[in-house]
Amino acid sequence: FCTPCLQECLKPKKPVCGVCRSTLSPGSRALDLEKQIETTETTCNGCNKKMYLSKMRSHAASCSKYQSYIMEGVKAVTKEPLHSTRSFPNRFTFPCPYCSEKNFDQEGLVEHCKALHSMDAKQVVCPICASMPWGDPNYRSANFMEHLQRRHRFSYDTFVDYDADEDDMMAQVLMRSLRDK
């Protein structure tokens, strides 16, 4: 994993594994993995020197041939100019709208609010909905706890294509409904 992707997995209050998305336990070390890294030999792709995986990171930092090898790979995949950077809202972590504690994933926000704010009647903006393309960042839910439990029992990322044009999708659905009678 690259560092930014790994940091996204570790950012929520309940960090998850980057491969299987299971919850990670803080402080527990993968001793079998550490042993495997200490005993597995590899070859540097730059200078062809053999070493253990555990030594590869420090070697790569000082091996000019390895750094050239990496830059050749980067040049090979960046033939087109980079697309203009659009501002994408953060849809992975959210602040609590009651106490402003940060970095909750959707499930963590629901659990946090159930545990600490279940009796709070203050009308607040749902940070999950506000991050969605259709979300209104000014809409205050009359009953936020009920909203959370009804609306956010699953992650929208599983079901939504954020780049799709909603009007085009609606037109396609209408056309198919007329055709499939």
Image: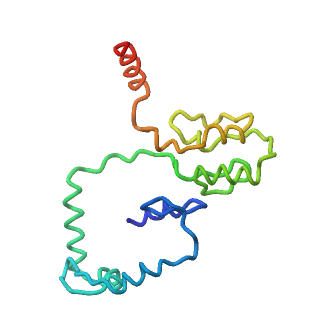
Relative image position of residue 100 (x, y in whole percent)? 69, 53
The colour scheme used here is rainbow
Q: Residue at x 21, y 65 (%)?
A: 73
Can you say whether 161 is above or below 91 in the image? above
Relative image position of residue 48 (x, y in whole percent)? 18, 82
Left or right, 36 with reference to 124? left
Can you say whether 118 is above or below 172 in the image? below
Can you say whether 46 is above or below 179 in the image? below
**Total of numbered circles in the picture?**
0
Relative image position of residue 166 (x, y in whole percent)? 44, 28
Q: Residue at x 25, y 50 (%)?
A: 81
Q: Residue at x 37, y 86 (%)?
A: 38
Task: Using the image as rendered, state which of residue 115 and residue 72 is in the foreground.
Answer: 115
Relative image position of residue 143 (x, y in whole percent)? 74, 36
Q: Quadrant of the N terminus?
A: bottom left
Q: Residue at x 60, y 43 (%)?
A: 153
Task: Using the image as rendered, state which of residue 119 and residue 7 is in the foreground.
Answer: 119
Task: Using the image as rendered, state which of residue 146 and residue 85 is in the foreground.
Answer: 146
